[in-house]
Amino acid sequence: MADSPKVGAVVITMGNRPDELRALLDSVARQDGDPVEVVVVGNGSPVPEVPAGVRTVELPENLGIPGGRNVGIEAFGPGGTDVDILLFLDDDGLLARTDTAELCRRAFTDDARLGIVSFRIADPETGETQRRHVPRLRASDPMRSSRVTTFLGGANAVRTRVLAEVGNLPDDFFYAHEETDLAWRALDAGWMIDYRSDMVLYHPTTAPSRHAVYHRMVARNRVWLARRNLPLPLVPVYLGVWMLLTLLRRPSGPALRAWFGGFREGWTAPCGPRRPMRWRTVWRLTRLGRPPVI
């Protein structure tokens, strides 16, 4: 990595939050150090007006979150290799501080094994971080930074060497769990992932179930995640644990029907190439506090 790593940013938008998008882009422009180059991808929609210097790509159809982000990656060259670090930011988010890009540069420069950094997401009104936004099982203290085994999709930084080595996000997932798929592949290749509480993206508190496809996609992609990445003995254990957790959460009847429909689809639809992680990666995940059975 260069002495001053080059940073780019990928933002996907449906074109329906122009004010929030502009605020995000302004927060990126205010970052300390060298300017961050930005690509905004219109995911099946026109891109609203953006500041001068921001590149745009307009897709004729919605490719989903991973598909849209992959288009943004390739806008920085094959695997994003025109830059050293890529930020992935939700279009209704806002970088809370002006030193986030510099903190990323320093983190990746200081730790040659670091592949991905997950930011802390905080509500702009209350400053609170939801437990689900802390990517580890021990999530009670969001202010504690640590090594983790996955990351948050719309608030992170990725070393582009990771993408060149293990590939981009899985297009077919469309929505949900694409980050964990990439995280597991990165960990299996020897990279590490950090959760950093001092790298903050403001984002309004919302429920993931607001998406109409949430329950089906979560279940389908959970099966795909296991089929693609886990050693065979762990596949039924991992999926059995998640089925039990889903039932314990007592979802509504329609939600449960959608979940089981997605679970069946996960077994019957192609999931992409199977590259099971090594058992030493299973042990690494376990030592990091999250064995790949939950």
Image (cartoon, helix red, strand yellow):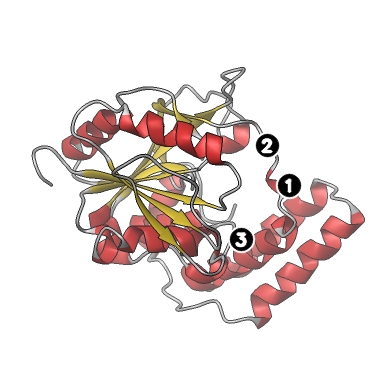
| Residue that appears at 61% across and 47% down | 16
Please state which of the two labelled residues, at mark 1 or mark 3, is closer to the viewer: 1
The residue labelled by disc 3 is: 238
Which amino acid, by three-letter code, is at mark 2? Thr
Q: Nearer the viewer, residue 93 or 267?
A: 93
Asked whether the beta carbons under mark 2 and mark 1 sit within 8 Å of each other, the answer is yes
Please state which of the two labelled residues, at mark 3 or mark 2, is closer to the viewer: 2
Question: On the picture, is 59 further left or further right than 217?
Answer: left
Q: Residues within 10 Å of mark 2 (few under 14, many from 20)?
A: few
- Of all residues, the one furthest to the top in this rendering is 126
| Residue that appears at 27% across and 29% down | 103
Rendered location of residue 232, percent (x, y): 53, 74
Q: CA distance from mark 2 to mark 1?
A: 8 Å
Secondary-structure class at tag 2: loop
How many discs appear? 3
Which amino acid, by three-letter code, is at mark 1? Arg
133 vs 232: above or below: above
- Quadrant position of residue 161: bottom left
